[in-house]
Image: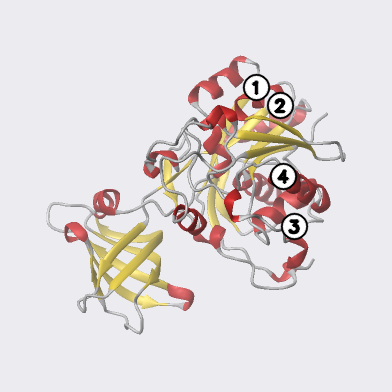
Amino acid sequence: MDVSDFDFFLPSERIAAYPVAQRDASALLVMNRWKDDPVTLSNFSQIGSYLPPRSLLVLNDTRVFPARLRGTKATGAQVELLLTGKLAAESAAVEEWEALSRGLGRSRSGVEIAFPGGLRAVVTARGERGAVRARLLAPAGETVGGMIERIGEVPLPPYIVAARAGQPAGEPPTGATSAAAAPTPPIDDRERYQTVYARTSGAVAAPTAGLHFTDALLTSLGDSGHEVARLTLHVGPGTFRPVTVEDTSQHLMDSEWYTVPPETAEAIGRARAAGRAVVAVGTTVVRTLEAAARAGEGTVRAGEGRTNLFLEPGAIFHVVTDLITNFHLPRSTLLMLVAAFAGRERVLAAYGEAIRAGLRFYSYGDAMFIRGTP
């Protein structure tokens, strides 16, 4: 398909610069996967009212780490590294990382970057589009991991940073629902750009569909007969990378690491055998389950691997029956996945309804539930 088939106009004021004060106070749009029924507008706290009975919800428990480091070269020039993956560790104080760089200019391998607190980086190799390898060295008595946690910044998506330039903290979120119309308090992104069930550190972006859940809501869903299972996919920087080809079939996804625990594979097997809904909380869960099913010849088996699975209209979904997701960027692989799941025309029509209703888009925005199980 042509990438322009996934374009739509989004007014800038529909981009959420900040989350609502209460996670589950986000708006919720409900649409059907197979029918052109009118959409329903609700509140995320009511998600249990729309889930099929005894649904299995699958969550991605990856944890965003403070991957953005800001430092300087010996010349005084400012440099930014976005850490994307640890390659090796000589010791707790010396580690080799892959990263994306900004501000290195024409600096060759061997250039040193100084960060606050005494952390240093020596660039050992340079690649395309800002990709580098860097040796991180912690000061005496410190560890690289500890320094990253102390001085690193949460790598917020660029559209949030841009939106905040025009919407100061403390103002009501644009398009806020009545339940969230109070002024937004200052946001601690280290806590808020993280799901309440995040466990395994390694992502540079949050699985944002899960940001709407609270511990109380998850407990309530369990008390109502729904089941919850977890897996891990570490979201990489490719989630922000635009599709640069006109023919979407020519797009290459970045590879991301995932693992499916034995108890999750067993829960999926039981749900499928009983004809129960398998509800993916987010596109990362969809990609993990569908990649695992392809590797297992239709069966989701426990284990880990890497996936660069790209799902666009025409793709077959072997496991996921229902989907909770956010509203995604035009021309993005995330929108293409949702369109593959529920139909391009149907999804874009629902996006149009969301815009007219004043819902908020992207990572800190509102949610949609695509119901595929009667």
Marks 2/1 in contact by CB < 8 Å: the verdict is yes
Residue type at mark 3: give it: Glu
Position of 254 with respect to 320 (left or right) is left
Percent of width and height locating residue 280: 65, 38
Task: Identify the residue position indicated by label 3 in the image.
Answer: 312
Task: Identify the residue position indicated by label 1 in the image.
Answer: 226
Residue type at mark 4: give it: Arg
Q: Earlier in the sequence, mark 2 or mark 4?
A: 2
Quadrant including the C terminus: top right
What residue lies at 31% left-to-right and 80% top-to-bottom? 109
Q: Nearer the viewer, mark 2 or mark 4?
A: 4
Task: Identify the residue position indicated by label 2 in the image.
Answer: 51
Instruction: Please tell me in which quadrant of the rendered image residue 81 appears.
Output: bottom left
Position of 345 with respect to 222 (left or right) is right
Marks 4/1 in contact by CB < 8 Å: the verdict is no
Q: Nearer the viewer, mark 2 or mark 1?
A: 2
Mark 1 neighbour class, 10 Å CA radius: few under 14, some 14 to 19, many 20 or more: some
Residue type at mark 1: give it: His
Q: Is residue 270 above or below residue 79?
A: above
SS label for mark 4: helix
Q: Earlier in the sequence, mark 3 or mark 4?
A: 3
What residue lies at 69% left-to-right and 26% top-to-bottom? 55
Task: Identify the residue position indicated by label 4 in the image.
Answer: 356
